[in-house]
Image (cartoon, rainbow, N blue to C red):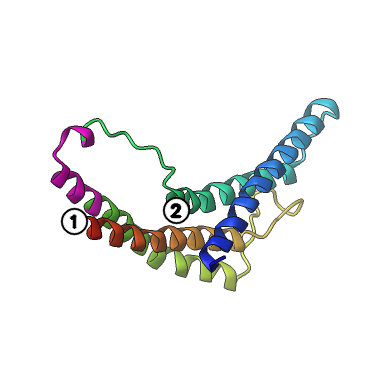
Amino acid sequence: MDPISKFNSKLSFFIMYATLLITLVVVYEVSTRYFLNMADSRAIFVSVWLYGILFTLGGAYTLREGGHVSVDIVYRKVPEKVRKVLDVVDIGIVTLTGIILILVGTPIAWRSFMIREVDSSLGIVFAPPIWWFKWIAVISVVLITLQTIPMMLEKTRQWR
């Protein structure tokens, strides 16, 4: 099995269990709120983090698998040559956007890491570290941007 297939297998495994973990955390949070009449703010933070990780890393995986939903009302009605151009332009926009987000997000994540940033919105009761979460966003954008390279090569190969 090649390294990319191994990575995709591990990522799909992670996505499956992250979904299960999110479900358990939300059930816990709702149960403590309704049955014990006390909200656990940690559960809310954990569920938000898990949702964020799931959707950002899941976006790269979905792009790799070609699973994104697209509205192609206009796309279906244009000639094949125009579709090929639109595909390359679309992938180019995603790549350029990814590069910009990486260039902007990396210094923000680095600065957050250097100061060991925490979320102090709840004061001293619970101040979880959030610097690592900013790196998740950068990593997912890197993965999506890297995925656009083989997509662009495939689309330009189809022009021949």
Magenta residues, as a range?
Answer: 75-88
Quarter that holds the N terminus: bottom right
Q: Residue at x 64, y 53 (%)?
A: 14
Q: Residue at x 54, y 63 (%)?
A: 135
Q: Quadrant of residue 28?
A: top right
Whole-angstrom CA distance, mark 1 to mark 2, is 21 Å
Label drawn at residue 64: 2
- Pinpoint residue 96: horizontal percent, then vertical percent: 30, 60
Disc 1 residue type? Trp
Name the element at disc 2: helix
Q: Earlier in the sequence, mark 1 or mark 2?
A: 2
Name the element at disc 1: loop
Q: Is residue 100 at least partly visible in the picture?
A: no
Q: Residue at x 25, y 49 (%)?
A: 87
Left or right of 4 on screen, residue 100: left
- Pinpoint residue 120: horizontal percent, then vertical percent: 65, 54
- Pinpoint residue 59: horizontal percent, then vertical percent: 48, 49
Quarter that holds the C terminus: bottom left
Q: Which mark is in front, 1 or 2?
A: 1
Q: Name the residue that disc number 1 marks.
A: 159
Q: Nearer the viewer, residue 126 or 110?
A: 110
Q: Is residue 81 magenta?
A: yes
Disc 2 residue type? Arg
